[in-house]
Image (cartoon, helix red, strand yellow):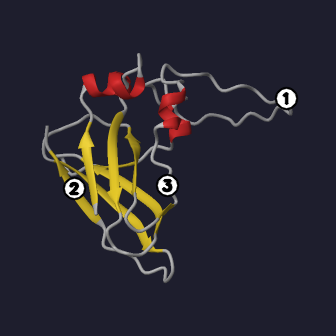
Amino acid sequence: MGAAAYVTAEQASAAFGKVNPYAHGILPILVVIENGTGKTIRADLRAEWEDSDRRHVEAMPPGDVVLFNGVRKAPGIPNTSPIPHKKAKGPLHTWEIEGRAFSAKLIPPGETASGFIYFESNFQPGSHLVMSGLKDAATGQDYFFFEIPLDK
């Protein structure tokens, strides 16, 4: 029912234009879900990257990816000013990051949904993508979680 693929630099160029997320510390994974169940699937997708060292990294929302600048700052004192401030744009601030993200909520029978899921991680052979949150839309019954091995 599902497939995932590591995106090479050449493929990233085709998908994201001049910006390569991987060059900025973001690992894009293309996820393709083909619904062969005969029933509508609700996709409340939760994805986790497990690298070869067994470290688990949760997927980043696409809105966080476009603001990501490669450096995580320690949380500071929250802004208490009533004046809203713009968040700094990161080097990945392009429409392709959010526009090509996996966003399907329902997948009708016989249809396919695809898009990118992003992780703050590097690719390592022997890593896995773990996905859950696919349910029968009518009954709410969970389908099995998927653990997809990714090798270069």
Please indicate whether residue 83 sits to the left or right of residue 58 in the image.
right
Find residue 61 and name its label: none
Q: Secondary structure at mark 2?
A: strand
Q: Amino acid at mark 1?
A: Ile
Give the class, few, some or many, for how many residues have Cα within 10 Å of label 2's Cα (few <14, many ≥20): some
Sequence-earlier tag: 2 or 3: 3
Question: Residue 148's x, y, as percent?
Answer: 22, 56
Residue 104 - label: 3
Query: Seen from this angle, which residue lies furthest front?
Result: 110
Q: Which residue is mark 2?
A: 148
Is 21 positioned to the left or the right of 130 in the image?
right
In this orientation, which residue lies closer to the viewer: 147 or 135? 135
Closer to viewer: mark 2 or mark 3: 3
Which residue position is annotated with label 1? 83
Q: Residue at x 52, y 33 (%)?
A: 74
Provide residue 60's location: percent of width, then percent of height.
46, 43
Which secondary structure, mark 3? loop
| The C terminus sits in image quarter | top left
